[in-house]
Image (cartoon, grey):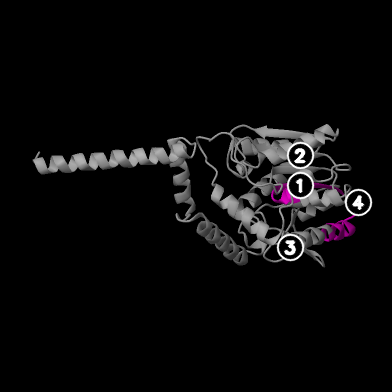
Amino acid sequence: MPNQNKKRLVRLALAATASAFGYACHALSQDRSVRSKLREDAYRLKSGLDYGEEEENSSQYISKRYDQYRRTSDLLSCPHADGVTSEHYSAGKVHWLDYTALEETEEVLVYFHGGKRLDHMTYSEWRMLEKLQAKLGWPIMVVAIESFFTRSYALEVELVYQLICQVKAKHQGYNWHALAYDSGAALTLELVEANAKMFKQVLLLSPWLGEEVKQIEHLDEDYLLNRSQEEAVESAWQDQDPLPKMTEMTITHLPPVHFFVGAYDSWKQPALKLYKRLRAHNKTTRFYLFERMVHDFALQAMPEADETLDLLVSELKQ
């Protein structure tokens, strides 16, 4: 090999070694393993996030979510929402999965979707609900939650409360149960705090209760939470409304509340805090913890998601 090529290879090897050393130092300076840093960077690329200043990324993230919200403001724009029956009331609208089942049962499940009022109900949520409805056999009523770009959180809680009352006035003689995913949990708890008899029981799936995001306790080998997106959501909420912080809610007259949470969910601690408060006050409550699962595990195609659906059905039919 010519001497010039040998020198060139040596320079390239030294450069690669220096880059790897710098990458490792950067990861270790953040109290993380090199492997977790690699996984986070891969996740960033997959999510299409831009590198740069964190504040700029947050702004871009919120703008992107707002544009998506305006383009998909109707829940029925989701192609997975075929065969859904809609009802309109003065306080808003609701969508029914298997509306005809109202004639065959006295039980109704009301679903409050996630998205932290930045995103509407996702394809994965529709798919999860369809699977649940097939197992449960009850009609499921989906409440369309408005974005905080449209109206304040306090007004949204008030209008959803009125909406549920109007629906129950039309469809009398049923037992009403609630299932909430993500930020739908905070709104649902606001409703039962105001009226403990609104629902027979409340099931919270990967609940978001308004607390600020916490670092996951274990850096999962398969997933590293993208904190920049979550901090952007919190920042956007703080600009519009105070975070609700439902861990501090009044729990004196709550109906049974059950939790379904992934062990690697960064919002696990607020849910656990509320659960412990309920237990301390002898309230009917259960906490199902799924090992190595992250926030949206129940919406994914995996055995743990199917197990969750079976547990939801079991709790609802008790």
**Quick check: marks 2 and 1 in contact, CB under 8 Å?**
yes
Q: Which of the two discs, 3 and 1, labels the residue nearer the N terminus?
A: 3
Q: Which residues are magenta?
A: 162-186
Residue 247 position (above or below residue 147): above
The foreground one among 87 and 58 is 58
Measured Cα–Cα span from mark 2 to mark 4: 31 Å
Q: Label 1 crowding class (10 Å Cα cut-off): few <14, some 14-19, many 20+? A: many
Of pointers 2 and 1, the one earlier in the residue sequence:
1
Instruction: Label 2, secondary structure: give it.
Output: helix
Q: Which residue is mark 4?
A: 173
Q: Local crowd at mark 3 within 10 Å, few (<14), some, or many (≥20)?
A: some
The label number, if any, that marks residue 246 in the structure image:
1
Residue 246 seen in the current view = yes
- Looking at the image, the residue that sits furthest to the left is 2
Mark 1 secondary-structure assignment: helix
Checking the image for residue 274, the label placed there is 2
Q: Is residue 180 magenta?
A: yes
